[in-house]
Image (spheres, coloured by chain):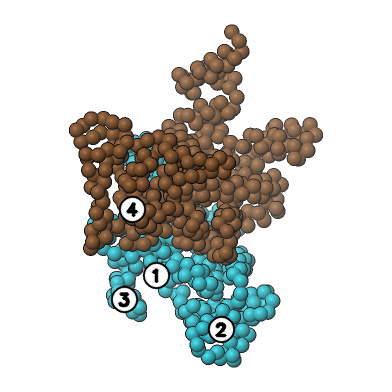
Chain colours: A brown, B cyan
Amino acid sequence: MTSVDQAKQVEKAPAEDDLQSGGEQIYVAPPWKLMWWRFRKHRMALISAVVLILAYFVAIFCEFVAPYDPNQAMLQFKQVPPTMIHIRDAQGQFHWPFVYQHTRTMDPQTLQITSVEDTSTRYPIQLLVHGFEYKLLGLWTTDIHLFGLSPAAQDQQGEFIFGTDRLGRDMFSRVCYGARLSLSMGMVSVFLSLALGVVLGGISGYYGGRVDILIQRVIEFIRTIPTIPLYMTLSAALPRDWSIIRIYFGITMIIALVGWTFMARVVRGRFLAMREEDFVLAARLNGSGEMRIILRHMLPSFLSYIIAALTLNIPNMILAETGLSFIGLGLRPPAISWGVLLQEAMNLRSLVLSPWVLVPGFAVVISVLAFNFVGDGLRDAADPYAR
Amino acid sequence: MLGYIIRRVLIMIPTLILISIISFTALLLPPGDYLTSYAAQLRQQGESIDQEAIDSLRERYGLGQPVYVQYIKWVQGIVTRGDWGQSMEWQRPVRDLIGQALGLTVVLAVFSLLVSWLIAIPMGVYSATHQYSLPDYLMTIFSFLGVGVPAFLWALIIMYFAQTKLGLNVGGLFSQQYLSAPWSWDKVVDLLKHIWIPGLIVALENTAGDLRTTRANLLDEVNKPYVELARAKGLSEGRLLWKYPVRVALNPFFSTVGWSLANRISSITLMSVVLSLQTTGPLQLRALTSQDMYLAGTILLLLSTLTVIGTLVSDVLLAWVDPRIRLEG
């Protein structure tokens, strides 16, 4: 038996039996493997992780996933309700997913658009169809999209999974594009706050004493100021004529300015707990320098906690950006983020006539919940040796 | 006890100074000074400019002088005359504008705090004592809904259903006739009729965290030896639970009143913009978009002061309940 085979067997075995009653492989498994086994037991976390991977796939390849150009106002399709996708026709026969022909009429009094399905004509949903041109990852020009109707039907008939907005723009495409800014913003600001949090929390926990007290006071002070009013004040100070990219980074920095306090607390707590550990003392007696002790010995043992804390912190960042853009102080149109899209719902007429403008809100809820579940799972898995 | 309170109040002072510096800096960030735009605005409206009045305002707020002079004059005005500056947009002293809005924000925050305690404590205790039961799972789901759905989204959803299904308009905190009426008994009753929807929305977002804290803390407490001892002495289960572990489990709750007030103020701010409530939220948003900086700065300053006071109250309460704290100082 080769060593590769052996490794494979070890990997397979614990899938069948429980971690608690686990066989010998538990004693030889490296920490990351123990963490994975533990994480896997948290079913919601596992499902949420898949959801997040999909969401980030959409965010990265939004041009490919979106069937329509998100800024294209199709005047003939204003406030069209979501199009149902069927797999079963009126006669009860199953088909490849399709949409029916729609006759859309507008009520002259309420301006509400009603869509009636004409079950005699079916348009199958096609995969990898030609649509608007874009640059994939900013490199290759192409016009292939994940799905859509045949080009003619796409324009005449339309398939709008989440309906269209007041100007006749496809909500589904807009939500896909919104994912790019909203989800990346959560990531970028969490890493910015991580950088600040690790440095300041690390100093605080490692050196202790006066520096520690000072940094802790600063953290308490920052957390006293209500976040949304503070974010509002700071982002209102960003110049109006800045480009989308600059506003994006401005907002990210503002959010990270408060976010680092949460990271610093976690890092400090870990440092305090670990400072007294025997292996740190041993490293010090061996003559390791401070930096080496921190980076080589301490960091690996609390990295998992940091990753868990990071994941639990991303929802706050996403919610902050959404809230700010929603009330018009964050990103502004033509930038597309979930918060910007929700501005449409502020208009009571729009909300009543086309409640699907709330869909970006549900995208926020799903990603926030998913991050929370994954974070919970990671936190439980962070210390695989604790029983 | 009195010594402890005095000490805590003294510690507050540097915090307040820091807050005022931050608010003032935020107030200076946008380009241009307020009197210049004020004068421009008057000129635009074709009104004659009373140069003397402008100069006296310039003198009073120290505009055009170094930043620290402006700051000192602003603080001096607040402390000595209760003068928070002049609102450019409303052409009135800031003091006249924020009173009611701030009061309503406080009422909403405290109301939602009480509601979420009323919900979270019994539910958390039940959840912890009946771990892994069906209600426990239901409450976990409920708390995740609270975590995932921000207050402003609830507000939008409720507004939609109220408008389409019930034909109600849930926006606002007062009926039309009481909007600008002076405070009276009827107005208070009218406020109570309107406040419960926004109050519940804010409570909903924040109850989840409280519930999870209660549950987690209580689960830590119930296995401790003192509980075992009380049980061994024959205390009834209900009495035992509420008299000892629950009280300990709720401690961190009260010690973080300040932070939970801050969170609620954030939720209220966004939600108020959606429901157009007459709280500080829409007022601050409007002040910020029209660069009415004294108004915006004052609101930030006062909201932060609120949470500082909240922290003070909670510290004093804790010291009153737990003598160890006031001895440590």
Q: Are marks 4 and 1 on the same chain?
A: no
Specify few, some or many for label 4: CA neighbours under 10 Å numbering under 14, 14-19, or 20 or more.
many
Q: What whole-number distance in Å separates the C-alpha atoms at marks 4 and 1?
A: 37 Å
Mark 4 and 1 residues: CB-CB less than 8 Å, in contact? Answer: no
Q: Which residue is mark 3?
A: B178
- Position above or below: A154 against A349: above
Mark 3 and 1 residues: CB-CB less than 8 Å, in contact? Answer: no
Q: Is residue B151 visible?
A: no
Give me the residue at 55% from left, 74% from top: B294
- Position above or below: A125 against A182: above
Q: Is residue A28 visible?
A: yes
**Amino acid type for the residue under numbered disc 4:** Phe
Q: What whole-number distance in Å separates the C-alpha atoms at marks 2 and 3?
A: 35 Å
Q: What whole-number distance in Å separates the C-alpha atoms at marks 3 and 4?
A: 43 Å
Q: Which residue is mark 2?
A: B39
Q: Which residue is mark 4?
A: A77
Give me the residue at 60% from left, 76% from top: B33
- The reply, left or right, for residue B62 in relation to residue B87 is right
Q: Which numbered dot is residue A86?
A: none
Q: Which numbered dot is residue B278?
A: 1
Q: Give the chain letter at badge 1.
A: B
Point out the tag, 2 or 3, that comes first from the N-terminus.
2
Q: Are marks 3 and 1 on the same chain?
A: yes
**Amino acid type for the residue under numbered disc 1:** Gln
Quarter of the figure with the N terminus of chain A: top right
**Amino acid type for the residue under numbered disc 2:** Ala
Q: Residue furthest left?
A: A91
**Amino acid type for the residue under numbered disc 3:** Tyr
Q: Position of residue B321 (x, y in %)?
A: 48, 56
Q: Give the chain letter at badge 4.
A: A
Q: Give the chain letter at badge 2.
A: B
Q: What whole-number distance in Å separates the C-alpha atoms at marks 4 and 2?
A: 48 Å
